[in-house]
Image (spheres, grey):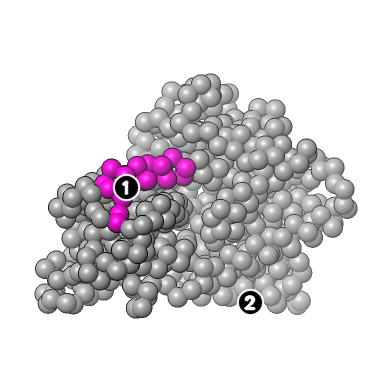
Amino acid sequence: MRTVSLARCFLLFFSLCLAPQVHAQQFLPKSHPKCQTALKVFDDLVRVVSDGRTRPALQLLPRGTTSRMRVAWFNPEQNSLTLEERTYDLCASLGPDSLDALAAVLGHELAHYYKDHGWVGDFGNGFADLEVGQTLRQLRGDLTRMVELETEADYFGWFSGYIAGYQTLDMVPEVLRKIYAEYQLGDNIPGYPSLSERQEIGRHSAEKLHQLVPIFEAGQNLLIVKQYEEAARCFDHLARTFPSRELLNNAGLARALEAIPLFPEGQLRFAYPFELDAATRLRGGKKAEEYDLAEPREEHRSRLLEEAKDLFETARSKDPSYAPAYINLACIAELQDEAGEALFFAGKALQLARRNREALSLANALIARGIARAQSNPPDEEAARQDFEEARAGNPSLALFDLKALGLRPAGSLSADGEEKPSSQREQLGGLSAQEYDLILEAPDAIAGVPAASRSQPAIDIDAKQTASWSGLVIDTGYRTFVFLEARRGYQGESGRGIRIGSVMAQVAEAYGQPSALVPGRQGVYHVYERARIIFQASADGRVQGWMIYHIEE
């Protein structure tokens, strides 16, 4: 989550370059600190919504420049999105919420581009006069269509912002109020919804989006605790409405992880960078024993891997610079005994991760390449060792496991300190344990769900609630109930064994021992402690970014 304000970002960039003088009719240079900050938010959004088309260019129009359009707009002839510096400053005035506000404005405009709205739905076109007046006049007789376009842009743009890590869902009513005040716009603009109507559109879109967020979070959490089939259903459901690269990738990831326990025990020597589940891999997972398959195990495994591959391919077609899709394709290729293809995809992922300066993706790409090198014919274990050693800088736990698999210890063995430390203590968050979930069910903030797919796949029901301390989910899959309480941003409390946000992961290991499972994610690695029922999210620099406690009820 972003807690740094635009004002702070401006100060950080200002130390690197002084704002140059800008003449009328010129855009701010890309080196300008405001451009740098806006471009960072813009890049985050584009990475989520990109569908392979050439991305628009972002331009900041300086204060004092004469413009017939206001706020922000997309120009299809130049394939450019223009944001007024005045609007940027308005977002910056919101302090800690400023980046979220900027993401809401830019996400809305990008939605008009990627949803092919052209000129019609621009965030600022209702405030324009001559240049878009003709278009507006054509729409005056169809205000319903205008509302539909604005609603779709809200819906698509804000959920994109949420997936990119911004709190965009409830920002626009306040942003709109400030825009109308800043630009001294009347409440009623000919050919465009009034301020109150526009705010109501935003609130309605936010309400609908709040039904999607619990499904997204449920999919992530179910994946972390190895409920892969149910996680895949959550991501599939969302991808039908919002086929982003992240959702497609996660849907493929759930299938790939579901296929892992279907390999014969002992066949998989290494831990793959789309997951590490040492207990399952070394002892043969219980999940594999639960299947009552209509098709043989090997055929089921092959089908899951092919479905995962197709989804990863679609994700990379959405954004050819999306390194995680290439990493996952490399892992799939290796599991399908295609070492040459695995090396190709791992090499491409390395290039992208280095170019994008993504430390965790870089480490995972190195691990994927190391596995392919170790499994090639003939194997090159020295090159694999070098890859795993280099990967320790970004994903130390996974890299160390695979180094052990190379022979530092016999494959499949754990060190003496490699077990989770037992404790009879019940973890709490904000004074509440995960077993005490009646508070969520009695007064949820949102109720969502995934429809039943068949008699063997009942509906997934989700209740969500937030307090000042935690965000809670209760997920009823029809067979089990899963409860998650996650520490909210800025939570100052500590876990039952003294771990806080910002603690180093060595302190976690000292307090809790070896995790039962490690699940790499693009934003960090999840350390799962099944006995304590607690999950820590570790950053690339080895610190706790957050944690959640959970409960499973049969």
Q: Is residue 526 left or right of residue 530?
A: left
Q: Earlier in the sequence, mark 2 or mark 1?
A: 1
The answer to whether residue 33 is visible is: no
Q: Quadrant of residue 405?
A: bottom right
Query: Mark 2 sits on what residue?
Result: 344
Q: Quadrant of residue 492?
A: top left
Q: Position of residue 121 (x, y in %)?
A: 36, 61
Residue displayed at 26% across by 66% down: 133
* Within-10-Å neighbours for mark 2: few <14, some 14–19, many 20+: some
Residue 226: assigned label: none
Residue displayed at 14% across by 52% down: 184
Residue 310, magenta (yes or no): no
Q: What span is in magenta?
A: 191-209
Question: Could you tell me the amino acid type at mark 1?
Answer: Arg
Q: Position of residue 235 (x, y in %)?
A: 60, 50
Q: Is residue 235 left or right of residue 204?
A: right
Q: Position of residue 487 (x, y in %)?
A: 43, 36
Question: Could you tell me the amino acid type at mark 2?
Answer: Phe
Q: Pick whichever, 137 or 369, lies toward us.
A: 137
Magenta stretch: helix, strand or loop mostly: helix
Element at label 2:
helix
The answer to whether residue 176 is visible is: yes
Q: Pick whichever, 130 or 344, lies toward us.
A: 130
